[in-house]
Image: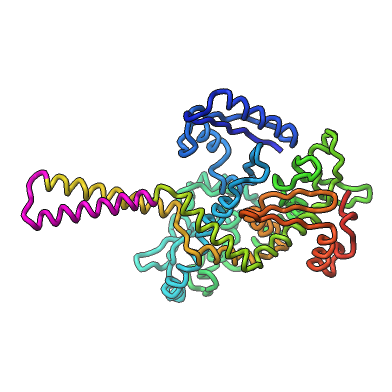
Amino acid sequence: MRGVIYARYSSDNQREESIEGQLRECKEFAEKNGITILNSYIDRALSAKTDNRPEFQRMIKDSAHYKAVLRKNSVKVVSATEPISEDSTGILLESLLEGYAEFYSAELSEKVTRGLTENALKCKYNGSGLPVGFTVNNEQYYELDPLTAPAVLDTFKRYDKGATIVELVRWLKEKGVKTYRGKDLSIDSVKRLLKNRRYLGEYIYGKITIPNGIPAIVPQDLFDRVQERLVKNKKAPARFKAKEELYLLSTKLHCGLCSAFMVGESGTSKTGKFHQYYKCVSAKNHKGCKKKSVKKAWIEDIVVNATMDVIMDDAVVEYITDLVMELQHRENVDLPRFKEQLDETEKAINNMLNAIQQGIFNKSTKGRLDELEAVKGDLEVKILQEEMQRPLLKREHITFWIHRFRKLDITKPEQRQRLIDSFVNGIYLFDDRIVITFNYKEGCKTISLSDIMSAVKKSMSGSDLSAVSAADQVL
């Protein structure tokens, strides 16, 4: 693993020496867990209440964006002094806010689907991305773009005759063809272009597909030949990607004997069989720990199933909902303050208006009223911005979000990863038990060897795992 260190001390009660201590602890942690440090970022005498810190911003710029973006890029934030995060419920809130758009989309769709469906049945443009080669007229109907539609047809013809995707990207750039956002077409966007059935004249919106609903650019026989070539060219990389599995428990799985990370490893046996497993970093580096490696699929299945058991417990869902409701009110200190200031300002405006009604009106009165109105407008904008950046969620939003996890397909790696990232704080693997801590107070579950066997037999009935012991999963 590779990583960076971020250290900071505030101007309140810390000194330069605290930076040295933080760096020392972080470097010791990195050495213990096999992490190669690429860079260090240090902010001196700056409060954590703001992210307007030069080194913090440099770190964010170097790494990507904030936690959500880091997570999407497989970058994880860990603490050198707190393997089990003390603000674990905050992780739940972050995940919930990321998923809030899902609730909003579901709620909004009930209100607007009818109108959008009517538009779709008339083959009208319903917003979102507009494919290269099309424009939209004043009545929202698709029309061919005389400048780019011929280039789309030529792109299909060139690929059919043997041009590569990279060559097409270069050719389209030379022709000046851009996306509807005004950007050059990339490799991925050209691949999507070659698969887009709208070029056959199909109108597509959600589950609604209407043949010949829009003008066609590409004939059927050419489109079919292009699809056949795309499939042939995809087979080789698809076989390679099949082995590129995520290690779901990275930075969460700890050795129960020495507390070091257990990291993903893979290898091929003498028989040619491909193996994936987790190995203690200390044991791997021969630093005295004797913890044996454990098979990846086995330990991940146990954690995923234990987490799903938590999600299925209605009492736990109610408890988590209460915690998140309390936390979001406690964390957002600006919104209540802005609302309180707005209330005071509106009272002052009402007092001024009452004074005017009583005949008290002069330049000072008017100036003060204008000033209060300006303050009111500014506060209303701040409140709106705060609510957009961190919407105040209702109970039904939170329970809706948690219940969505009950419908996850836990056979899919990306959905398993989402479940683990949202709810699991840390896992300690001992020789006789597994201790799982979840992202809510008192959220801890210990599974003994006998519990593991019962869980595996119950959840993996009919599979190879149900017929073997936990000891057989150790390498």
Residue drawn at x 59%, y 45% as measured from the top left: 70
Residue at figure coordinates x 53%, y 69% from the top left:
206
Instruction: Answer with the quarter of the image where residue 417 lies.
Output: bottom right
Percent position of residue 63, x then y: 58, 38
Q: Is residue 149 magenta?
A: no
Image quarter of the N terminus: top right
Q: Nearer the viewer, residue 314 or 182?
A: 314
Q: Position of residue 334 (x, y in %)?
A: 40, 47
Q: Residue 367 versus residue 101: which sits nearer the camera?
A: 367
Magenta residues (range): 336-364
Say left or right for 287 vs 261.
right
Q: Is residue 351 left or right of residue 401?
A: left
Q: Residue furthest right?
A: 270
Q: Is residue 239 visible?
A: no
Position in image of residue 430 (x %, y %): 81, 49
Residue 143 position by quadrant = bottom left
Magenta span main SS: helix
Q: Name the foreground residue: 202 vs 264.
A: 264
Q: Residue 339 magenta-drawn?
A: yes
Q: Is residue 257 visible?
A: yes
Image position of 373 with respect to 196: above or below: above
Q: How is the image coloured?
A: rainbow
Position of residue 134 in the picture relative to residue 18 (left or right): left
Residue 76: horizontal and vertical position, in percent?
64, 44
- In the image, taking residue 343 as reference, residue 172 lies left or right, namely right
Say which residue appears at 85% left-offset and 49% top-offset: 431
The vertical placement of 219 against 388, above or below, is: below
Report how many numbered discs are placed on residues in the image.
Answer: 0
